[in-house]
Amino acid sequence: MTSTFMPQLDPKLAIYDQVLPARKPWAQVIKKGQTLRIVDLGGNQAVDFLV
């Protein structure tokens, strides 16, 4: 199944940009209306995401 919804995000408008090494935890407050994008830079990785 593929999604047709792909928002166009301008990286220059990001308020936070973080690259994490493998197995490093991360926490951040995401406010209503903000968008969180998770990108696997290395390939073959799994992202655990808890809201």
Image: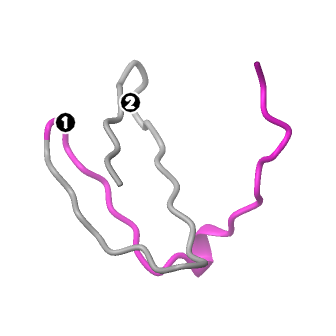
In this rendering, the count of numbered labels is 2
- Spatial CA distance of label 1 from label 2 is 10 Å
Foreground: disc 1 or disc 2: 1
Task: Provide the secondary structure element on which disc 1 rests.
Answer: loop
Of residues 10 and 35, the one drawn nearer to the viewer in this rendering:
35
Contact? badges 1 and 2 (CB < 8 Å): yes
Task: Give me the disc on residue 50.
Answer: none
Image check: 51 left or right of 31?
left
Q: Amino acid at mark 1?
A: Ala
* Mark 1: few/some/many CA within 10 Å (<14, 14-19, 20+): few
Q: Amino acid at mark 2?
A: Gly
Is 4 placed above or below 13 here? above
Identify the image's colour scheme: rainbow, by chain, secondary structure or one colour.
one colour
Q: Is residue 4 magenta?
A: yes
Where residue 50 appears, as percent x and y from the top left, is: 31, 48
Of residues 12 and 16, the one drawn nearer to the viewer in this rendering:
16
Q: Is residue 20 magenta?
A: yes
Q: Quadrant of the C terminus?
A: bottom left
Residue at (31% x, 36% y) in the render: 48
Image check: 5 left or right of 33?
right
Say whether disc 1 or disc 2 marks the residue closer to the N-terminus: 1
Image check: 24 left or right of 46?
left
Pointer 2 residue: 42
Where residue 19 appears, as percent x and y from the top left, is: 31, 54
Residue at (15% x, 50% y) in the render: 25
Chief secondary structure of the magenta span?
A: loop
Residue at (23% x, 63% y) in the render: 27
Residue 7 lies in quadrant:
bottom right
Pointer 1 residue: 22
Residue 3 lies in quadrant:
top right
Q: Quadrant of the N terminus?
A: top right
- Magenta highlight range: 1-23
